[in-house]
Image (cartoon, rainbow, N blue to C red):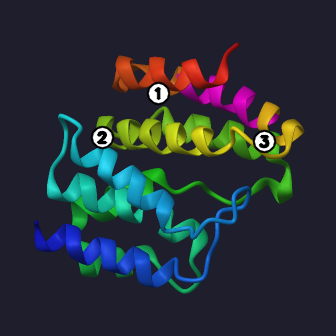
């Protein structure tokens, strides 16, 4: 296995340690692990693509980790992908405005970042099969809007994602 991928997996495991998924209480690292494993078998797979999959939530969910840390440790390609995948916390807690901003930003990211976002979102919706119905309904509606922005990246992943969130 590539050293870059191993270092990214270890970095993610260390920094997501003691975190748990909001709606399942599973260890958080299970999510980036699944995203990375799915990324590893995608036709776009490169060591950088898989490393970015392991690290895709690190800036959003881990304190005291900065983009410069990722560039220094994992290089420009990985740093750029993680930056493209990182949602911006803004709009004073207004979720609707924040999600609109995320969609607008994601419409401008690289093809690789869009594919990783599709894989990420598929994993997220799979985990939401149980739990709070009101949140799941809202998340599915947001996913439909987001999927439209990502469709051009990978039709097969798009169809899989839409299959989870539409009746």
Please tell me the numbered disc located at residue 112. Answer: 2
**Residue indicated by mark 3:** 97
**Mark 1 Cα-neighbour bin, 10 Å: few <14, some 14–19, many ≥20:** many
Which mark sits nearer the N-terminus, 2 or 3?
Answer: 3
Question: What's drawn in magenta, residue-wise?
Answer: 138-147
Label 2 packing within 10 angstroms: few (<14), some (14-19), many (20+): some
Q: Return the residue found at the far right.
A: 134
Magenta residue check for 158: no
Query: Residue 38: x percent and y percent?
Result: 32, 44
**Closer to us: mark 1 or mark 3?**
1
**Any part of residue 165 in sight:** yes
* Image vertical order of residue 160 relative to residue 103, above or below: above
Residue at numbered disc 1: 150
CA separation in Å, label 1 and label 3: 19 Å
Q: Are marks 1 and 3 in contact (CB under 8 Å)?
A: no
Residue shown at the point (56%, 77%) measured from the top left: 62
Give the CA distance from mark 2 to mark 1.
Answer: 11 Å
Give the percent coordinates (x, y) of residue 164. Answer: 59, 25
Q: Nearer the viewer, mark 2 or mark 3?
A: 2
Find numbered disc 2 in the image and state the secondary structure of the residue it sits on.
helix
Quadrant the N terminus occupies: bottom left
Residue 80, above or below 158? below
Main secondary structure found in the magenta portion: helix
Element type where label 3 sits in the image: helix
- Image point (35%, 26%), residue name: 153
């Amino acid at each position: 296995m590539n050293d870059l991928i191993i270092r990214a997996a270890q970095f993610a495991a260390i920094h997501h340690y003691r975190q748990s998924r909001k709606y399942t209480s599973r260890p958080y690292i299970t999510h980036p692990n699944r995203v990375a494993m799915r990324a590893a078998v995608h036709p776009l797979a490169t060591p950088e693509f898989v490393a970015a999959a392991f690290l895709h939530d690190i800036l959003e969910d881990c304190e005291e980790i900065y983009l410069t840390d990722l560039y220094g440790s994992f290089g420009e390609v990985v740093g750029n992908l993680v930056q493209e995948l990182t949602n911006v916390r803004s709009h004073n807690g207004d979720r609707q405005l924040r999600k609109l901003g995320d969609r607008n930003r994601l419409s401008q990211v690289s093809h690789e970042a869009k594919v990783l976002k599709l894989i990420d979102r598929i994993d997220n919706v799979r985990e939401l099969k149980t739990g709070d119905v009101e949140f799941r309904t809202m998340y599915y509606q947001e996913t439909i809007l987001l999927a439209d922005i990502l469709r051009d990246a990978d039709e097969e992943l798009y169809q899989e994602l839409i299959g989870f969130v539409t009746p």
